[in-house]
Amino acid sequence: MLHITTLHYLVLGAALLLLGVIGVLTRRNVVVVLMSIELILNAVNLNLVAFSHYWQGMPVHLGGGSLALHGQVFAIFVITDAAAEAAVGLGILIAFFRNKETVNIDEVHLLKW
Amino acid sequence: MAVDTAFNMAPVATPFFFYMLSGIMLIGGILVITRKNPVHSALALITVLLAQAGIYLMLYAPFVAGVQIILYAGGIMVLFLFVIMLVNIDRAAKEKTFNSQWLVGSVAAIALGGLFVAVYIKGNNIFPEHVMPGVADDSNTQNVATLLYGQYMFAFEIASLLLLVAIIGAVVMAKKRI
């Protein structure tokens, strides 16, 4: 309670990732499944930024210091990937909806034998 | 030097803000995966993203926080809301919220949670408690840009290529007839 350490942020990220996994595995609506994927990506981002902050506290000769922002740079890359994934996923969803008139993920079985 | 004192000032009530923001995030996440109406889910997800931007600020990452708000809450979620408006049908609201394998999915997710708890118990003291500095750096954006355009130049270019592919892919997917 007194100090917020890196572990606090990691536990929060793990909880968010679990919520996202539950959403991906149990929801029927494709849009909500995509939103749960966004939750997962955000949990990863939280871990990356928390580790970046942790690493900034390390000594400079070990690669730390205020210039050690690799985690934040990776978080930006993850956000870029999330944008690309959302655009393509929603495009696929619109194409699917045009064909089948539904957004139910149980009916997405065109590739299933 | 008023600026220096402002940046070197110790953060106020860090535990309070951390627990408040993480509570908002967890409640919002639960709402995202339980609401029947996808619009409500999207609004809850926006709340989660904004609270996470606050967490980024607490971690001394103002640039990532800004990107989070502008790109995620402002860009991606608007895209989601547009698509919800495009594909939302009344029939979906009357159907079940969860799919046929919700039990198996929940069990798998809980198993993953058990794995996390085990890792937490095993690695409880990996991170020394005292290394959580208040890194006072007023040039965070500049340092991030130096890394992005220096060491991560190639990855940056690949990311731009990925965005180009995503644009073309989204247009091709959503277009009725090429």
Image (tube, rainbow, N blue to C red):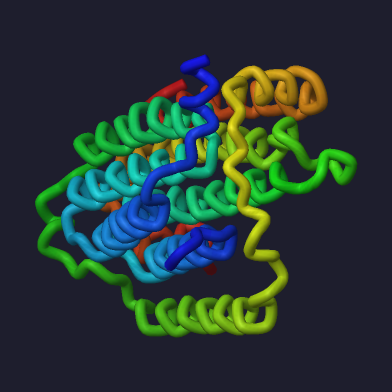
Q: Is residue A70 above or below residue B63?
A: below
Residue B77 is situated, as x and y percent measured from the top left of the image, at 33, 36
Judge left or right: residue A91 versus residue A77.
Answer: left
Q: Is residue B104 above or below residue A87?
A: below
Q: Nearer the viewer, residue A77 or A47?
A: A47
Residue found at x 30% / y 31%: B78
Judge left or right: residue B81 versus residue B55.
Answer: left
Residue farthest to the top, as pictured: B1
Residue found at x 24% / y 52%: B41
Residue B101 is situated, as x and y percent measured from the top left of the image, at 38, 78
Q: Nearer the viewer, residue A80 or B50?
A: B50
Total labels drawn: 0
Residue B38 is situated, as x and y percent measured from the top left of the image, at 22, 51
**Which quadrant, please, contains the N terminus of chain A?**
bottom left
Residue found at x 68% / y 77%: B123
Q: Nearer the viewer, residue A110 or B40?
A: B40
